[in-house]
Image: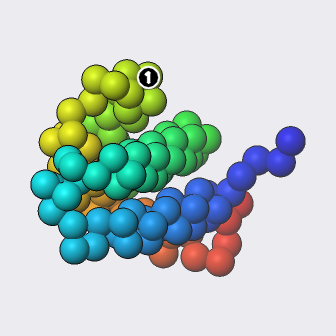
Amino acid sequence: MTLRKRKSYCEDILELSGYLEESLEGKTFEDYKTDWRLRFQVERIVANITDQLVQMVNMFPELKAGISKLKDIRGFRNRIVHAYKHVSDKIVWDVANNWMPELFDEVRAILASIGERDD
């Protein structure tokens, strides 16, 4: 099995960030609460982002320092993956709109620090 590279994880997270931003564009919390398709879409994208992040820092522990809310994101990931029906819409909305943009900036910084070389 070939180990994924740090750069690959970062690029995947940032690709998912575009999907999340597109999904949320022009949407309000009320839209989110009343549109099951939007809720499902946002929850799945956020779950995928958090999965990629957790895999990346497990594989490359030196990257943990670059993720400010790592502990909170791990906890949220576990809740959304394992207790799906019990995750508050307000919490998912807050994570998607407030935590994720900060995370994406941190992942961009990690990617920039990696550059073309990724050993």
Total numbered labels placed on residues in the image: 1
* Viewer-closest of 31 and 65: 31
Measured as percent of width and height from the top left, residue 50 is found at 44, 44
Q: Quadrant of residue 73?
A: top left
Left or right of 108? Residue 73 is left
Q: Residue at 50% across / 47% down in the picture? A: 48
- Compared with 103, 73 (above or below) is above
Q: Residue at 86% across / 42% down in the picture? A: 1
Q: Residue at 38% across / 32% down in the picture? A: 80
Task: Label 1, secondary structure: give it.
Answer: helix
Q: Residue at 58% across / 76% down in the picture? A: 115
Circle 1 packing at 10 Å, graded few (<14), some (14-19), many (20+), is few
- Residue 38 appears in the picture as rendered: yes
Left or right of 30? Residue 45 is right
Measured as percent of width and height from the top left, residue 49 is found at 47, 51
User: In the rendered image, which residue does mark 1 sit on?
Assistant: 82
Amino acid type shown at disc 1: His
Left or right of 22? Residue 57 is right
Left or right of 6? Residue 50 is left
Measured as percent of width and height from the top left, residue 53 is found at 48, 47
